[in-house]
Image (cartoon, rainbow, N blue to C red):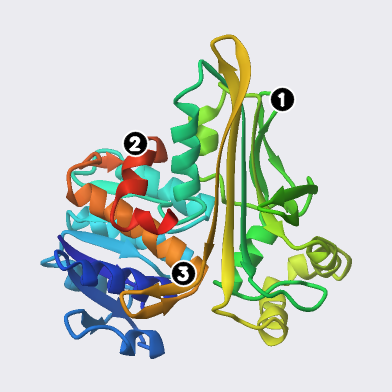
Amino acid sequence: MRILILGAGRIGTAVAHMMADAGDHRITLADRHFGHEASQLAPSIAQITADAGDPADLDRIMRDHDAVLAAGPYHLCPVIAEAAVRNSLHYFDLTEDVRSTRAVSVLAEGARTALVPQCGLAPGVVCVMAHGLAHGFDQVEAIRIRVGALPAHPTGPLGYAMTWSTAGVVNEYCNPCEAIWNGERREVLPLEGEETVILHGTTYEAFNTSGGLGMLADAFDGRIRTLDYKTLRYPGHRAIMKLLLEDLKLRDRRDLLEQVLEASVPTTDQDVVVLSVSVDGMVHGRLTRKSWTREVGARDVAGMHMSAIRLTTAAGVAAVIDMLAAGQLPQQGLVRHDHIDADTLLANRFGQHYA
């Protein structure tokens, strides 16, 4: 498959590296500017300068490609998806932004190609796993998803490091969160719903953040009592963020909050991604729970060192693109998480990074 990747950041370059190394996809990477990550890529990956926010530029670079991955800012996803439909390309993105996904879903109606939003980590792989676990139940009562992208060696009271987009973190901490509670679909406040979670011997705090459910709320609306997504952090993190966002009112100054976090919170490639998906429901008349948990650390992939969040996000979307190329997904219209078989995804050569 001839794949155009828009965005030469950490995720875009990781997907390009993984898929080019597999040897049976032709990869083109496009961005306005290319940094250090792009300089490490193999010569077989074409690099072209383009503006993903310019429809005319998108039409120019989409020629001679079969699929496009939007790996840049979430607000560009609808623009890129519209160009993909116009130029008959399959479309993939990584966004957790609810409005962007709704716009992509509308564009998918009647499209001659497949539009696959939210196919990274969360939303993405964890949503696929939730559907996979739910298949074995006569009646699903509750789905709980907990995800943490954390420093492997936490220091300081925040116990945090910037392992991915600062704008994405601020978005998750500030926007309303979708949930289903007592059978009713509703919006809940970010940073609320605090609970203690113990996974693999480590204690975390969990609280509401936005975007991680993807399209699960649509899929299970009217069919389930409880559905929620919460972020995992080391204890004490939430109280500090609540002080910044609410007491100091930085929720209303997101640009300033981004500047503060980027100036004071270090980045790291020594991270860990902690995943937990659990489903409760009835099986043959008995209340039953099925769970899927993973702890993925940073590692080298085909000669390139990747942080855990970079690896898990890139592996998720690479596996979905690979599955579509192999005819294992619908070839037109909106492709939802329930269209993606969990076992097939994990068995995929890219999905195996979750093993």
Type of amino acid at the residue the image marks with label 1: Asn
Mark 3, residues whose alpha carbon is within 10 Å: few (<14), some, or many (≥20)?
Answer: many
Instruction: Tell me which residue sits at (63%, 52%) in the image.
Output: 210
Question: Can residue 56 be seen here?
Answer: no
Q: Is residue 261 above or below residue 347?
A: below
Instruction: Give SS at disc 1.
Output: loop
Mark 3 or mark 1, which is nearer the start of the sequence? 1
- Give the residue furthest to the top: 285
Instruction: Tell me which residue sits at (69%, 71%) in the image.
Output: 254
- Give the residue furthest to the right: 247
Mark 2 or mark 3, which is nearer the start of the sequence? 3
Mark 1, residues whose alpha carbon is within 10 Å: few (<14), some, or many (≥20)?
Answer: few
Type of amino acid at the residue the image marks with label 2: His
Instruction: Tell me which residue sits at (51%, 45%) in the image.
Output: 214
* Left or right of residue 270: residue 352: left
Q: Which mark is residue 182?
A: 1
Q: Name the foreground residue: 94 vs 285.
A: 285
User: What is the x, y in percent for residue 9?
Assistant: 41, 78
User: What is the x, y in percent for residue 119?
Assistant: 40, 52
Residue placed under numbered mark 3 in the picture = 310
Q: Which mark is residue 339?
A: 2
